[in-house]
Image: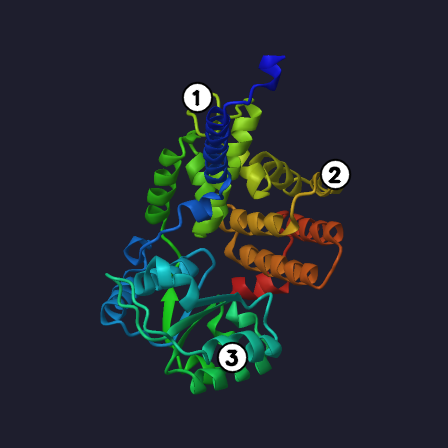
Amino acid sequence: MSNFLAPKDSSSSSKSVATSSTNAGAKDISNNSRSRPWVEKWRPEKVEDVSHQDEVVRTLKVSIQAGNLPHLLFHGSPGTGKTTTILAVARALYGPELYKSRILELNASDERGISVIREKVKSFAQGSVGNQRTPGYPCPKFKLIILDEADTMTADAQSALRRVMEAYSRVTRFCLICNYVTRVIEPLASRCAKFRFRPLPVHSMIERITFIGNQEKVNLAPGALDTILSASGGDMRKAVTFLQTSHQLACSSSNITDMTSTSKNAMVTSEMVVDVAGQVPVTVMDELWKKMTGTAFEGMQYAVDKIIAEGYPMSAILSQLHDDTLKKSTISDVNKSLICEKLACADLALADGANEALQLLDVAAYMMRRLKGQTNLVDRLVAAH
């Protein structure tokens, strides 16, 4: 009874609670770092770490040192470092303390109406800037508004944005990010310093993918890296995503729960990358080409039906047919041009909502006729000249 009535040792109980909470917190931090997408985890934090955009980096570093930044317009292919660069510029200007209060980042593809410009953008742009400073950073007396996917904004929203840029340029700078600069109205583009981001070359992508793979302990089979590069098409973000997803697929296939540990069984192969990227396997395309070069229409139709039944994306099929056509030396230049034109017409028809099975069958039947050597008026005219 005395033991039952005796008070518990509060210090020991609190210590055990603190220990358990600490362990739980450490576990949460470990799980969060492990579950983060590699695209965000390995995003360059500094401007000089951006790959292959030497002219852009050199110019922006001068602006950062001077503490003065013009309105910016970044344009180029997806995954070339546009958003990463401007975020790194913002960190270099304001530091970690003032970063969140001085930056407004909007994705214009989701918020692209004129109401957003009048409410969110204008209210943030017209606010005054305080005298807070972070030691070691320029901390200029202007804010920064980042509009991603600015080429999807409506014409009215772009016109309203032009007026906001005119009125509040003293206390606010704008950075417009887009893939197609021609879709930005000229009065808006003329107020910005344009920077074109070039597609990343093969050696830059190999260097970065190899670095991330070594840090994450990824085992790449021979040929897997080349498959990642060809599937990404110069898009670094897509390449890193393919690498992470393929690694997770390899670990799940090998029944490995700890993806941070190195295991020879968790080998990323080219087949895994093809499955993750949604591409059509080489064996399937070879079978289709074999049937198209044959003489039996039924065999070619069976190959097309099989591809449709497997659910492969039609855009990937047309793209691979285009690349294979250009690579084959047995096809004449005239036939290559006509086949590519047919593929372009099929791609346009699919964009307009045409049936995928009928379009692929139409393309395959046309290519079958061309590959069988049937001539027409165009061939005779070209041969005559």
Name the secondary structure under disc 2.
helix
What residue is shown at x 67% (from left), y 61% (from top)? 351
Residue of label 1: 264
Q: Secondary structure at mark 3?
A: helix
Q: Which residue is mark 3?
A: 122
Q: Position of residue 179 (x, y in %)?
A: 48, 66
Give the class, few, some or many, for how many residues have Cα within 10 Å of label 2's Cα (few <14, many ≥20): some
Q: Amino acid at mark 3?
A: Lys
Q: Nearer the viewer, residue 316 or 221?
A: 221
The CA distance from mark 1 to mark 2 is 39 Å
Quick check: 135 left or right of 179?
left
Q: Residues within 10 Å of mark 3 (few under 14, many from 20)?
A: some
- Marker count (numbered): 3
Q: Position of residue 348 (x, y in %)?
A: 65, 63
- Per the model, the C-alpha gap separating discs 2 and 3 is 59 Å
Residue 201's place in the image compared with 158, above or below, is above
Residue 190 quadrant:
bottom left
Reading the image, the residue beneath label 2 is 302
Q: How much space separates mark 3 and mark 1, taking CA atoms?
A: 55 Å
Mark 2 or mark 3: whose residue is earlier in sequence: 3
**Residue 86 appears in the figure:** no
Badge 1 or badge 2: first in the primary sequence: 1
Closer to the chain start, of discs 3 and 1, is 3
Identify the image quadrant of residue 131. Answer: bottom left
